[in-house]
């Protein structure tokens, strides 16, 4: 299995994981977040498949961070909503770990890439996975340090990245 085939499998595993989490969260706002992430992972797998087949594709930057922030607009007291959700912090930590592993792997593939097309693809995927990482990092911070967060649609004041 080459690096592109491995990356495809990794993205499809991520898509499956996020779809499972969407089902587990079907009664709360996080379902939408997990569905967005699953869709993103599926798009990444499709791009890598096209790279492997040497067919053309576009690296379209999405707005997943903005979309996930929009999910929480109008939710009201978001902190209290987390009390209704079973202990999800382990799910978020697992997702954070998976996203970090993806970032590390794509950075390695980027460093090992010899052609410009692969370099662009893996550079793009690093940025995409970093966005996913930020989503879960924000959720974990919201749960672990709720007193530091302001209740608004943008998760309140965050540290700059």
Image (spheres, grey):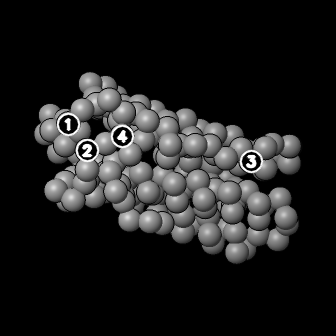
Using the numbered discs, state the Cα–Cα distance from disc 3 to disc 1 in whole angstroms: 37 Å
Location of the N terminus by quadrant is bottom right
Question: Residue drawn at (44%, 65%), measured in percent from left and top?
Answer: 160
The local secondary structure at tag 2 comes to loop
The local secondary structure at tag 3 comes to loop
| Neighbourhood count class around disc 3 (C-alpha, 10 Å): few under 14, some 14–19, many 20 upward | few
Q: Are marks 2 and 1 in contact (CB under 8 Å)?
A: yes
Q: Position of residue 45 (x, y in %)?
A: 64, 44
Q: Are marks 3 and 1 in contact (CB under 8 Å)?
A: no
Using the numbered discs, state the Cα–Cα distance from disc 4 to disc 3 in whole angstroms: 28 Å
Residue 40 in the image: above or below residue 126: above
Mark 4 or mark 3: which comes first in sequence?
3
* Residue for badge 3: 59
Horizontally, residue 17 falls left or right of residue 15, namely left
* Residue for badge 1: 77
* Residue for badge 2: 151
């Amino acid at each position: 299995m080459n690096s592109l085939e491995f990356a495809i499998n990794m993205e499809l595993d991520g898509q499956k994981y996020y779809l499972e989490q969407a089902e587990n969260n079907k009664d709360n706002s996080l379902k939408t977040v997990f569905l967005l992430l699953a869709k993103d992972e599926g798009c990444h797998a499709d791009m890598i498949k096209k790279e492997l087949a040497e067919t053309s594709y576009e690296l379209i930057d999405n707005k997943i961070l903005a979309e996930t922030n929009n999910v929480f607009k109008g939710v009201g007291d978001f902190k209290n909503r987390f009390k209704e959700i079973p202990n999800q912090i382990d799910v978020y930590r697992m997702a954070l770990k998976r996203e970090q592993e993806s970032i590390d792997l794509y950075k390695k593939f980027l460093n090992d890439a010899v052609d410009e097309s692969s370099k662009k693809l893996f550079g793009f995927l690093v940025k995409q996975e970093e966005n996913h990482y930020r989503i879960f990092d924000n959720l974990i911070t919201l749960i672990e340090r709720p007193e530091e967060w302001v209740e608004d649609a943008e998760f309140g004041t965050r540290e700059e990245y």
